[in-house]
Structure formats: C-alpha cells, structure tokens
Image: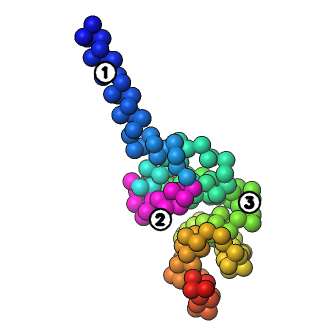
Amino acid sequence: MKKRQSITLFLSLLVLSFCLSPLTSECQSLSIDQVRSAFSQAIHDEIACDNLCTRMDAAPNINDPVWMAYKATLTITKAKYTLNPLSKYQYFKEGKALLDNCVLSAPDNIEIRFLRFTVQDHSPSFLGYNKELSADKQYILSNLEAIPFPKLKKSIINYIGICDRFSEAEKKWAANLLIS
C-alpha cells in the first residue's frame, strides 16, 4: 500500500510541476502583447528567437494575420542565426512568403506593413526583397497618427528615428507625435 501511495504522490507532483512550469503556462496564455514585448529581444538573440518561435507554435492564435506576421519575421530572423547558406535561404524564403501573405490578408494593418518594411529594410539587396519599401514607408507615414496602441506607436516612431530611409523632416514629424 505504501508503494502505491508513493507512486501516486510522485505522479501527482510530476503532473503539478508540469502544469506549473513556466513554458507550459506561457504557451497557454501567450498574447499578442507578450509577443510584441518578447519580439524586440528575439531579433537580437538566437535563444530568445527560438524560444519565442516555440511558444508561438504552441499557442492558439496562429490564424491571426498580425500574429503570423510576427512569426514570419521571426522565421526570417532565424536566417541570421544559421551558418548553412541553404538553411539561411530556406528560412528567408519561408518567412517572406508568410509575411507577404499576411500583407495580402490584411493590407490596411500598419503593424504588418511595418514588419514587412523593417524586414525589407534589413534584407540584403541581392535577395531582391525591397520592392515594397516605398509603398510601405508611405503607408506607415500616412497612418502613424491613427495607431491606437501607444507602445506600438512608440516602437514605430523610434524605428523611424534611426532608419536612414526616412528624411530628417519625417523623423522630426514622427518624434513630435510622441509629444502630442
């Protein structure tokens, strides 16, 4: 009888520890705001990128175009962390196709257009993924004031401030939106 109680206790503790593990709880409750927050670290850190990709794959939001645009951008980001040229190109190609589909499914979403703009801004010219830079830039500038999410608006304005594709006048105008 004691052996059975010990096994039952062990299994109960095992299940409890699994249910309370950070990875499990984060996968079940990962929100788009959490993705946005983790994204800035993921684009600069390979482990953070892999972790966020794993967490996003396990979350139920995979049909949301904004969610998928972040996933696409992370897939493209994985290319910079791999040494194999074929793997680099495969990650890039997969992410590019997914990101372009997100833009097609939600062409008026500034967040998706901004993600595509940043990817194209950082893509090597020999890949030819820069055809929408001008259109996305104009869309971002035309719709920046109307962004309802203050953190997102601030992130985009901060990016504009450091991006060479924006003129000094555009940078100044965008920075003034943070003040007003």
> Which amino acid type is marked by label 1?
Leu
Residues packed near mark 2 inside 10 Å, few (<14), some (14 to 19) or many (20 plus):
few
Is 180 left, or right, of 142 in this rendering? Answer: left
- Give the residue displayed 66% in from the left and 51% down from the top: 64
Residue at the spot of label 2: 40
Residue at the spot of label 3: 106
> Which amino acid type is marked by label 3?
Ala
Q: Position of residue 160 (x, y in %)?
A: 57, 80
Is 70 one of the magenta-colored residues?
A: no
Q: Nearer the viewer, residue 43 or 26?
A: 26
140 to 25, vertically: above or below: below
- Give the residue displayed 45% in from the left and 55% down from the top: 49
Q: Earlier in the sequence, mark 2 or mark 3?
A: 2
- Give the residue displayed 46% in from the left and 46% down from the top: 26
Magenta stretch, residue numbers: 32-47
Q: Position of residue 169 (x, y in %)?
A: 62, 92
Residue at the spot of label 1: 9
Q: Quadrant of the N terminus?
A: top left
Camera-near label (2 vs 1) is: 1
Q: What secondary structure is marked by label 1?
A: helix
Is 111 left, or right, of 80 in this rendering? Answer: right
92 to 5, vertically: above or below: below
Picture quadrant where residue 163 is located: bottom right
Asked whether residue 118 appears in the rendered view, the answer is no
Q: Pointer 1 and pointer 3: residues touching (CB < 8 Å)?
A: no
Is 49 left, or right, of 109 in this rendering? Answer: left
Residue lying furthest bottom: 169
| Distance from the alpha carbon under mark 2 to that under mark 3 | 22 Å
- Give the residue displayed 74% in from the left and 60% down from the top: 106
152 to 158, vertically: above or below: above
